[in-house]
Amino acid sequence: MSARICLLSLLLALLLPYCVQGQEKEDFFIAPLAETLMYSPDSISMGGGLALGYGSGGAMGFRLLYAADPESHGLVEMLFFLRLYLTGTNASTGPFIQINGGPVLFTYNGMGTAGRGVGTISAGLSAGWRFPLEKRWFIEAILRAGYPYIVGAGLSAGLRLR
């Protein structure tokens, strides 16, 4: 597991300068989000959270998500992300790809571990589209795949601050 953490940290350190170089207009965004995730092939977890990010053309940020599967578990994801907009170096809307990584904490109910927390590292890739609404508001749709979750999909609505 420590090799995965080192590899993820190295990847983030290498991509971070690219995400913030040459920006003429700084862009900070905040977005409440709703997401469904398949952490198990048998059930779907649903939840909500908040994303904070900085950058235009490329962005870096943090996502906090709480999701629950009513039958077996709850989870908290604390993911860092690096995003690249595909429409240009100063873009802040349109299609994007994103690398996600960070810790996820699980609590299992009714499986012999009643409420005990277990953690692991989560990593994955996302693809999405940011749709602008007026000058500062936006809606994002995102699809993602990775480990330990299988797939996920979500929507967020947010505000860009300059």
Image (cartoon, grey):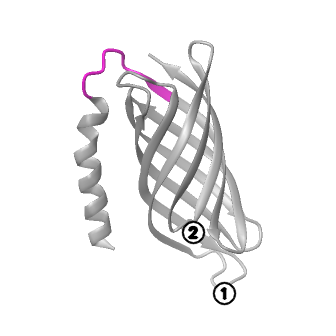
Which circle marks residue 106 in the picture?
2
Q: Nearer the viewer, residue 144 or 117?
A: 144
Q: Quadrant of residue 159?
A: top right
Which residues lie in the magenta part?
Answer: 21-29
Is 87 located above or below residue 67 in the figure? above
- Amino acid type of disc 1? Gly
Where in the figure is residue 28, as x and y percent of width and height?
A: 44, 25
Q: Quadrant of residue 137?
A: top right
The local secondary structure at tag 1 comes to loop
Q: Which residue is at 27% across, 62% downward?
A: 7
How many other residues sit within 10 Å of disc 1, few (<14), some (14-19) or many (≥20)?
Answer: few
Q: Is residue 25 magenta?
A: yes
The answer to whether 78 appears left or right of 13 in the picture is right
For disc 1, the marked residue is 112
- Amino acid type of disc 2? Phe
Q: Which residue is at 57% across, 41% downward?
A: 50
N-terminal label among 1 and 2: 2
The answer to whether 120 appears left or right of 32 in the picture is left
Q: How many marks?
A: 2
